[in-house]
Amino acid sequence: MRLNEVTYSNAKPVEGYGPGFFRIGGQVHDGALLVLPQRQMTWEGYADTAPILAARNEIDVLFVGTGAEIAHIPSDLRNSLEEAGIGVEVMNSPSACRTYNVLLSEGRRIALAVLPV
């Protein structure tokens, strides 16, 4: 079997996570996090849609990590994003991080809004 090193161009993958934090690009971020194509920022949770909607021309799909367990997101959030043309995939945070990294390595137009485990 042949293994290839994964490259991410200018975007940064999620390198790790743990109780209450995420590590991206060698930096530790405490709490919920929004990871957009070229930047990361604190995310205030499901009601914090403004930075996601502002990036709608940069992303096609948003992965929402709901913490340690999968949970439903508020219908208002899903509706706002879908009306803006952003697809929404909801999963637990570990799965969201892994899926984000895989699609990021493929050069996809994605973002990650993730609650800590």
Image (tube, rainbow, N blue to C red):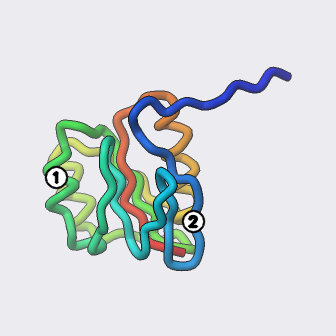
From the viewer's perspective, is 67 left or right of 6?
left
Q: Quadrant of the C terminus?
A: bottom right
For label 1, count other residues whose C-alpha is less than 10 Å away and answer few (under 14), some (14-19) or many (20+). Answer: some
Q: Nearer the viewer, mark 1 or mark 2?
A: 2
Q: Residue at x 26, y 67 (%)?
A: 75
Closest to the observer, 32 or 15: 15
Q: Residue at x 34, y 35 (%)?
A: 109
Count of labels shown?
2
Quarter of the picture containing the N terminus is top right
Q: Position of residue 116 (x, y in %)?
A: 48, 73
Residue 59 is situated, as x and y percent measured from the top left of the image, at 28, 39
Tell me the quarter of the picture where residue 78 sits: bottom left
* In this rendering, position of residue 43 left or right of residue 117: left
Q: Which residue is mark 2?
A: 17
Residue located beneath label 1 in the image: 53
The residues tagged by marks 1 and 2 sit, at their Cα atoms, a distance apart of 25 Å
Furthest toward the right, the residue is 1
Disc 2 residue type?
Tyr
Task: Judge from the rendering whether residue 105 lies leftward or rightward of residue 42; answer left or right.
Answer: right
User: What is the number of the mark on residue 87?
Assistant: none
Question: Which mark is first along the chain, 2 or 1?
Answer: 2
Q: Secondary structure beneath disc 2? A: strand
The outermost residue toward the bottom is 19
Residue 67 placement (x, y as % from top left): 50, 73
Q: Is residue 76 above or below residue 103?
A: below
The spot of residue 89 in percent (x, y) is: 42, 52
Q: Say which amino acid is labelled 1.
A: Leu
Label 2 Cα neighbours within 10 Å, binned few <14 / some 14-19 / many ≥20 = some
Residue beneath the point at 48% across and 55% down? 24
Q: Secondary structure at mark 1?
A: helix
Question: What is the residue that sits farthest to the top in this orientation?
Answer: 2
